[in-house]
Image: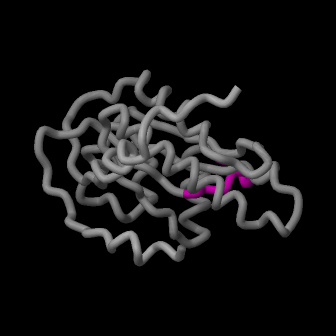
Amino acid sequence: PLAPPPGPAADFLSFARSRQSLRQFAPGPVPEEAIRRAVAAAQTAPTSCNRQTCRAHVWTDRALIDRVRRHQAGNRTFGHELGGIAVITSNLRHWEHAGERYQPWIDGGLFAMTLCYALHAEGLGTCFLNWSVDPATDRALRAEIGLDESHLVIVLLGFGLRPDSATVCASPRLPAETALSL
């Protein structure tokens, strides 16, 4: 049977508005159980034909975080504070023909955003680390983490404990009407 929704849409809107990209993190280990729950939530993201091709490759050891993040240029001012880093991938072996060429990106984006919200629900701070890189950088990351060619890197997601206070970039959102044709 169909489960009823948990509450009014305004609850999610308030929750979504409370998430900010952090570039400051508190020291300390990220609870492994929080990561497990967040990945379980990310697995609920919609997928094309329910293929469930996405995976979060996660590191929480400082030395390993540093090895992964050195391949991504946008974290230089705060990456040393991360409590964890996830490399989000989609397994290309699940896609059958050229007409599906964009699905790994779509499914991967849905998985990554759901993971981001789930980490936020666990009380953790997050910051997406884009993966718009040249092929040599992509190959270097793959070699670093032992990722074969069947996995497409979608995005990296840094996360960690939220500090008591932080400076957050002010990026006002446009009114909903600018994103809606009804």
Eyeballing the image, is 78 above or below 73? above
Magenta-drawn stretch contains 83: no
Eyeballing the image, is 30 above or below 11? above
Q: How many labels does the image show?
A: 0
Q: Observer-nearest residue: 4 or 67? A: 4
Estimate the x, y position of residue 19 in percent, counting from the top left.
31, 49
Q: Is residue 129 left or right of residue 150?
A: left
- Asked where in the image residue 104 lies, by quadrant, the reply is bottom right
Q: Is residue 111 left or right of residue 163?
A: right
Q: Coloring scheme of the render?
A: one colour
Estimate the x, y position of residue 37 in percent, counting from the top left.
48, 27
Estimate the x, y position of residue 17 in percent, counting from the top left.
31, 53
Q: In this view, does 7 lie to the left or right of 110?
A: left
Eyeballing the image, is 164 above or below 70? above
Picture residue at 62% right of the left edge, 41% below the top: 55
Q: Which residue lies furthest to the top in this view?
A: 33
Observer able to see residue 48 = yes
Q: Which residue lies furthest to the left in this view?
A: 165
Q: Observer-nearest residue: 142 or 53? A: 53
Q: What residue range appears in magenta?
A: 147-154
Observer able to see residue 66 = no
Eyeballing the image, is 44 above or below 48? above
Picture residue at 67% right of the left edge, 50% below the top: 90
Quadrant holding the C terminus: bottom right
Q: Which residue lies furthest to the right in this view?
A: 97
- Asked where in the image residue 178 lies, by quadrant, the reply is bottom left
Quadrant holding the N terminus: top right
Picture residue at 48% right of the left edge, 73% below the top: 180
Picture residue at 47% right of the left edge, 32% below the top: 6
Estimate the x, y position of residue 141 in percent, counting from the top left.
55, 55
Q: Observer-nearest residue: 96 or 14? A: 14
